[in-house]
Every structure is written in structure tokens, then in C-alpha cells.
């Protein structure tokens, strides 16, 4: 039995948590299932599956092996179909990460359309504000907003989000409408930091020559985009957030734009992926779809 066949059997046993059910689904003897798994365990030098009285469970190494085997098998399917005539169906797993706000307001509402076009794809969508380890955690690509300093990854620029200064109507009624940099000293800023203990950058604005930052008072500090928005909706202060995510809230009257003359620098948007010689077609197609989806919401990225 070659290694590819052994991987296919291992994946099926892992998914069904049963040697017997895997054998039935593949139309093969049960003994072949066990032999294939033992072959992989011998080659990889680790136990992949643990059999209990009720079912078969993956070990920690088995889970990591399962994820990689699925990717490799999908790549092989893609390779086989590369030279076939007619349209090629994308298949396999895509693991992607993106900010929660972009996923909720822009990507997820259109994801049904993408999945309808590619019904054989499986997407694992991670939405988090932390910087995931793309390689170690097995992500195919990640979307990041802001500066990118990881030189080990390839960064594809998509454009930039305009930044809008927002507050709730209740906050403006209570504290007034700031219009100048000097007014900011009398207002509350909701501070955003990636890690508690880090210093907030303050309120960013352009003075006609360059972008500057102004220290502002503020009793609330958050470390997630969702909390950043919710504290603003609750009337606790002013935020500076990507415009597309704020637009609907402003249209609904839940937030109002403040100090529009004091705009922060647009926030660049990137798709990052590992430095591989050949990027799989499913990743290329997904990244192109994301780029097209976000294009109407983005400004050209400043050179």
C-alpha cells in the first residue's frame, strides 16, 4: 500500500472514529484499515490513533497529521484535475483568519454565494483580533488591517480603509460635539490596545502637514474590536474605526460622526500567506474573491 492510499484510509478512520465504518465506506477489509494506520505510525514515528472500547480517537499528533493529510490529499486532487478539459472544481479545506468586524459586516453575508460556486470546498473561518501564527496554526491566508512587519510572509496589498471618528448620540448630547484638536481635551477617548499594559496611541489626526497624535483622557481601555464598538454604542467615548464598519451604524442613527476634519491615516488592508513556490488554486481563487469583495470599500493604498 502506498503512502497516499494510507493517508486516505487514515483520514477516513479519523473522521468516522471507527475502523469498521471506514472499511464499509471504502469497500475494503477492516484489516487493511489497521495496516494502513500502522504503516503511517511507523513512518512518522508516532501514535496517530487511540482505540477505546467505544470508538477510535485521534491523539494530539494524530490531529496534526489529520489536518496536514487532508491538505495534501486536496492538493493531489487539484493536481490531477489541473490538465483535465473543462472547468475545474475546487476542493479541499481552506483555513483563513480575518478581523471579526470585516467578517461579520462584509464577508459572511456573501459567503453563501462563494460556497454555491465552490460546493466541494470546506472553509474554516477564524475571526480574532490577535495575530495568529499563520504557519504554526496551519492557516492558508490571513487578512490583517494596519502595519505588517512579518518579513517571513508574503503580503498582498488590497487597499486601505478610511477611518471615521464616531460617538453615540447620547455622548454628543452630554459632552458636546468636538471640532478642533483643542476640544479633544474635554472629551473621553475609548482606548484600544492589542495587549493590556501597552500604551494607547491616542487620537490620530492630520494637521495639514503630517499625521499627529493627541493624548486624550479616557477611562475605558479595550483589546477587541467588538468591545471597541460596543463601548462606543454605550456612550462611553469616542472611537476611530474603519469607515465601512461604521457606515451602517451611522445610517441607523446609532452613532454619529464627530470631528470629520480630524481624520486619522487610512488603515492598509493585507492578505498574508506563507512563502510557497506554488500557492494552491483554491487559495488563489479565495484571495481573488476577497479582493473583489472588498474593493468597493477600500481607498487606493498610498505608495
Image (cartoon, rainbow, N blue to C red):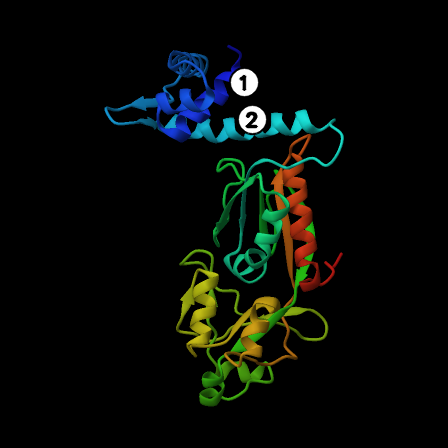
**Relative to 264, does residue 15 appear above or below in the rendering?**
above
Q: Position of residue 51 (x, y in %)?
A: 29, 22
- Name the residue at 61% across, 69% down: 243
Q: Earlier in the sequence, mark 1 or mark 2?
A: 1
Report if residue 145 is visible in the image: no
For the C terminus, the quadrant is bottom right
Left/right of residue 248 with respect to residue 268 in the rendered view: left
Left/right of residue 284 with respect to residue 246 in the rendered view: right
Left/right of residue 278 with respect to residue 124 in the rendered view: right
Labels 1 & 2 near each other (Cβ < 8 A): yes
Q: Position of residue 217 (x, y in %)?
A: 45, 76
**Relative to 286, does residue 34 appear above or below in the rendering?**
above
Residue 198 picture quarter: bottom left
**Residue 73, label in figure:** 2
**Residue 4, label in figure:** 1
Label 1 secondary element: helix
106 or 299: nearer the eye? Answer: 106
42 or 51: nearer the eye? Answer: 51
- Name the residue at 50% across, 10% down: 1
Report if residue 82 is visible in the image: yes
Q: Where is residue 106 in the image (x, y as percent from the top left)?
A: 59, 60
Label 1 Cα crowd, 10 Å radius (few <14 / some 14-19 / many 20+):
some
- Name the residue at 54% across, 18% down: 4
Residue 145 picture quarter: bottom right
Disc 1 to disc 2, how far (Cα)? Answer: 8 Å
263 or 156: nearer the eye? Answer: 156
- Name the residue at 50% across, 22% down: 8
Q: Where is residue 76 in the image (x, y as percent from the top left)?
A: 61, 25
Amino acid at each position: 500500500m502506498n503512502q497516499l492510499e494510507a493517508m486516505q484510509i487514515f483520514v477516513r478512520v479519523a473522521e468516522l472514529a471507527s475502523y469498521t465504518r471506514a472499511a464499509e465506506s471504502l469497500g475494503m477489509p477492516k484489516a487493511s484499515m489497521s495496516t494502513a494506520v500502522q504503516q503511517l505510525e511507523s513512518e512518522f514515528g508516532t501514535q496517530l490513533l487511540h482505540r477505546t472500547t467505544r470508538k477510535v480517537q485521534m491523539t494530539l499528533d494524530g490531529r496534526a497529521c489529520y489536518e496536514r493529510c487532508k491538505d495534501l490529499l486536496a492538493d493531489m486532487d487539484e493536481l490531477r484535475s489541473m490538465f483535465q478539459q473543462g472547468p475545474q472544481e475546487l476542493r479541499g479545506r481552506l483555513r483563513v483568519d480575518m478581523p471579526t468586524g470585516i467578517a461579520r459586516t462584509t464577508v459572511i453575508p456573501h459567503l453563501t454565494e462563494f460556497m454555491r460556486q465552490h460546493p466541494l470546498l470546506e472553509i474554516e473561518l477564524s475571526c480574532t483580533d490577535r495575530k495568529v501564527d499563520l504557519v504554526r496554526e496551519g492557516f492558508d491566508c490571513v487578512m490583517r488591517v494596519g502595519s505588517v512587519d512579518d518579513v517571513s510572509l508574503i503580503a498582498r496589498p488590497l487597499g486601505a480603509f478610511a477611518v471615521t471618528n464616531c460617538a453615540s448620540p447620547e455622548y454628543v448630547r452630554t459632552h458636546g460635539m468636538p471640532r478642533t484638536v483643542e476640544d479633544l481635551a474635554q472629551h473621553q477617548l475609548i482606548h484600544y490596545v492589542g495587549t493590556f499594559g501597552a500604551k494607547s496611541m491616542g487620537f490620530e489626526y492630520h494637521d495639514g502637514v503630517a499625521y499627529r497624535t493627541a493624548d486624550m483622557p479616557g477611562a475605558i481601555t479595550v483589546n477587541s474590536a467588538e468591545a471597541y464598538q460596543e463601548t462606543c454604542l454605550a456612550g462611553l467615548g469616542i472611537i476611530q474605526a474603519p469607515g465601512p464598519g461604521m457606515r451602517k451604524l451611522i445610517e441607523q442613527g446609532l452613532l454619529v460622526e464627530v470631528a470629520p476634519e480630524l481624520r486619522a491615516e487610512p488603515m492598509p488592508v493585507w492578505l498574508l500567506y506563507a512563502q510557497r513556490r506554488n500557492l494552491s488554486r483554491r487559495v488563489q481563487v479565495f484571495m481573488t474573491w476577497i479582493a473583489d469583495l472588498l474593493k468597493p470599500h477600500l481607498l487606493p493604498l498610498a505608495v
